[in-house]
């Protein structure tokens, strides 16, 4: 969700991982992996259903700690996986000769990683300025028959809950992410349209919401994220420290059960 490395917000100052989530923070890899535990089964299930053809060259954008890259290496079709991220410290353990770790900024218009049979980007584009143009560039890196798979967050809030501590902290988080690093999920539901505009065929999408219950990896991810963002949450004016504490206590309580932010996955194939 907020689990990648990406350039900074609208003012163009700083970088995503440095502004809020320092990659070298002792708990950052664990925070990212908690989200991966929740979303990887959906991601890998869809990628397997779409198929990784024999001899495929794959690009994993915003590879993070490499959980999807490792899965791709286990699939019989993958001949090479390029794991791209702005900060690749979490990929040091990848020693497979079929992996090429590429430290690069996706917003760099001079970036030319080659062409691919599968390109996957999860929880990356929503943090980037010029994301529509980036989708065009990603589509342009596809080989004929190649697949582009995009996944980002969408909110599905309870319309009857506008004032609980949980809702207020979640709303404050999205506002803080937007004002500090430029996160914007408003165009995520348009991803299928964007893929069609790029001339891709077999375009489809699905919305996935992992269970958000106390003690789950996803609950741990949000707890770690909110704790790390406390100053930014309070700076929005939507919450104070007491509200954040109440939301965190609720997140950890046995009675906690919410429909958390979902992940929209959209895909299309180059004719």
Image (cartoon, grey):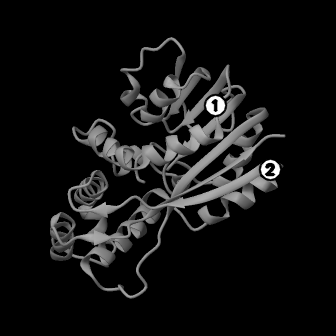
- The residue lying at 21 percent from left, 70 percent from top is 244
**Disc 1: CA contacts within 10 A as few (<14), some (14-19) or many (>=20):** many
Neighbor class of circle 2 (other Cα within 10 Å; few <14, some 14-19, many 20+) is: some
Q: Is residue 51 above or below residue 4?
A: above
Query: Residue sitting at 35 percent across and 85 percent down?
Result: 161
> Residue 198 got which mark?
2
In the rendered image, which quarter is residue 109 located in? top right
At 56% from the left and 51% from the top, the residue drawn is: 151
From the top left corner, tell me how far across and down residue 81 is, in percent: 57, 24
Along the horizontal axis of the image, is 262 left or right of 108?
left
Q: Which residue is nearer to you in this view: 204 or 69?
A: 204
Q: Earlier in the sequence, mark 2 or mark 1?
A: 1
Instruction: Judge whether 161 appears above or below 181 on screen.
Output: below
Q: Quadrant of the C terminus?
A: top right
Q: Is residue 103 visible?
A: no
For the N terminus, the quadrant is: bottom left
Residue position marked by numbered label 1 in the rendering = 52
């Amino acid at each position: 969700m907020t689990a990648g490395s990406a350039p900074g917000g609208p003012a163009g100052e700083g970088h995503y991982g440095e502004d809020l989530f320092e990659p070298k923070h002792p708990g950052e890899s664990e925070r990212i992996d908690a989200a991966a535990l929740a979303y990887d089964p959906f991601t890998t299930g869809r990628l397997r259903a779409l198929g990784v053809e024999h001899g495929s060259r794959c690009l994993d954008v915003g590879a993070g700690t490499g959980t999807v890259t490792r899965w791709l290496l286990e699939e019989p079709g993958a001949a090479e996986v390029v794991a791209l991220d702005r900060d690749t410290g979490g990929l040091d353990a990848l020693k497979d000769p079929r992996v090429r770790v590429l430290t690069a900024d996706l917003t760099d218009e001079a970036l030319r990683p080659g062409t691919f049979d599968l390109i996957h980007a999860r929880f990356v584009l929503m943090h980037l300025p010029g994301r529509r143009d980036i989708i065009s560039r990603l589509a342009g890196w596809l080989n004929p028959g190649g697949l582009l798979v995009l996944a980002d967050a969408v909110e599905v809030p309870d319309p009857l809950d506008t004032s609980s501590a949980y809702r207020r902290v979640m709303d404050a988080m999205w506002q803080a992410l937007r004002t500090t690093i430029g996160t914007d999920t408003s165009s995520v539901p348009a991803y299928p349209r964007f893929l069609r505009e790029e001339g891709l065929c077999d375009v489809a999408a699905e919305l996935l919401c992992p269970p958000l219950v106390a003690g789950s990896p996803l609950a741990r991810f949000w707890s770690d994220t909110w704790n790390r963002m406390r100053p930014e949450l309070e700076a929005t004016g939507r919450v104070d420290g007491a509200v954040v504490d109440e939301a965190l206590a609720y997140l950890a309580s046995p009675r906690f059960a919410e429909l958390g932010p979902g992940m929209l996955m959209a895909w299309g194939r180059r004719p």
